Image (tube, grey):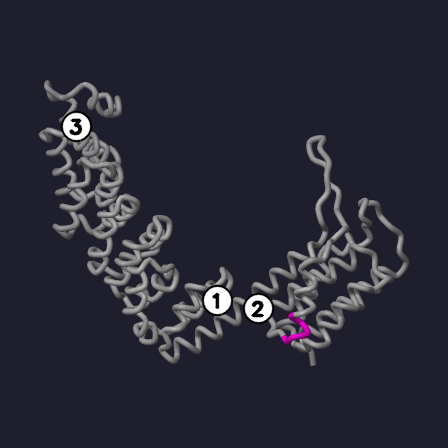
Amino acid sequence: MLRVSRLAPVMLMLFSGLCWSGLAQTGEPQSRPGQDDRYRILANKSATLVDQGDMPALAAHLQSLKADPALDNASKERLLRGTLLALGDLEPDASAVAEVRALTSYQSTARMPWTEHGRTGSFLIADVAAAARFTELRWQETAARKSASDAISGADNAVIELYVGGSASERTGIEEAFAAASPDSLANFVGELDFRLGQGDSVTGIARIAAIATRNSDLLGSVINHSTPEDAVQTIVLLDTQDWGLEALPVLEIGVNRQETASASLLKMGPFASTDPDARRIVLDALGGPHGASAAAALARANETAILDQLATLLNTSGDELTRRHALLGLRLADSDRARTHLRSFVKQADAPPALVAEVPTWLQD
C-alpha cells in the first residue's frame, strides 16, 4: 500500500506544468503521440519508488530517465528534476549519492520563451543540475542534524568543532539539532561556547540558540559582544524581552556599549524605562550621543508621564543642543496630550531657540 505522505507531493512536483512537456529547445510545440502518457507512467514510477524509499531502484531509474530515447528534452528534464527533489527527504545509499552527484553537471536544454514589454528571451523549464545540488545539500543537512543530535545527547563538545568547520548546509543541520534539544542538554555546552566566542570562533548560530533556550544572559551577552555586527543585531532583535523580563537588561546594556548594536539595544530597552531606573538612566543618557534618535524613539514608545516630563526638562534646560533635539524628537514621537502640552509650552518661551521651535509642528505652535 502506498504511503500518501510521500507520494502526493512527488506527484504534484512531477505533474505541475505538464503542458510544458511538449516544448523543444526552441520553444515550439512538438507533436509527440503518446508523450504525455509515457510521462505519466514514468512519473508514477518515480513517485512509487520514492514512497517505497528504494534507493538502488531510484538510482537506476534516474539513469534510465536520462537515457530514455522516447522522451523529449522537456519531459525528461522535468521528470529528472521532480525525482531529484523528492530524494532530498530520503536517506541515500552509495548508488543514489553517485547518481545524484553525476547529475550536478547535467546540462538542461529545454527552455520556455517569454515576451515582456517588447523584449523576448527564455528560461529553463527544469534545471536538473540545480535540483541535484539541492538534494546533495539536503542530505548533508540531514546527516549533520542526526550526528549533532547524537552528540548533544552525549554532551560531546565535538559537535562544536563540527559546526565551526562545517559547510553552510551542515551548519544548518546542526543548528536544527540544537533548536530541537532540551535546555538541560544544551546547558552542557554553555561554557565551551562562551569560550569559543571569546576566541573568535564562528559559533554564533548555536551559541544564540543555547543561550536563549537556557536563559543564560552571560552567554547571550557574549554572542552580542563577539559576533559580527549583523549577527549581533539579529540576536538583539530575536530576544523576547517580555519573556526574559529584567534578566534582559544586562544583555541589552552590553549591546548599548557596542557601537554597531547600540540602536537596536536602546529600542529594545525602551519598555523597561518606564519601570526600571537603571534602564531609564541608560536610555536618557544616550539622548546626546550618536544613537540619540533611537533613544528618543524608545522613550516615546514607553510614553510614561515621568519620562515625558524628563524629556521636557532636558528640552528646556540642557546645555547640549543634540540632547535638546533628541528630547524634542522623543516628545514629538510620543503622540500624547502630555507630550503635546510640553511642546506648546516650549514654543511659547521667549528664549526658545528658533531652530528647535521650527521642528515643532506648526499646528502646535498656535
Q: Is residue 95 magenta?
A: yes
| Label number found at residue 46 | none
Q: Nearer the viewer, residue 212 or 336?
A: 212
User: Could you tell me the amino acid type at mark 2?
Assistant: Trp
Q: Is residue 245 magenta?
A: no
User: Could you tell me the amino acid type at mark 3?
Assistant: Glu
What SS does tag 2 mark?
Answer: helix
Q: Which residues are magenta?
A: 93-97
Position of residue 11 relative to residue 249, above or below, is below
Q: Nearer the viewer, residue 364 or 206?
A: 206
Mark before the other along the chain sequence, 2 or 3: 2
The residue that mark 2 highlights is 139
Residue 138 picture location, percent across and down: 56, 65
Q: Quadrant of residue 41?
A: bottom right
What SS does tag 1 mark?
Answer: helix
Crowd class of label 2 (few under 14; some 14 to 19; many from 20; radius 10 Å) = many
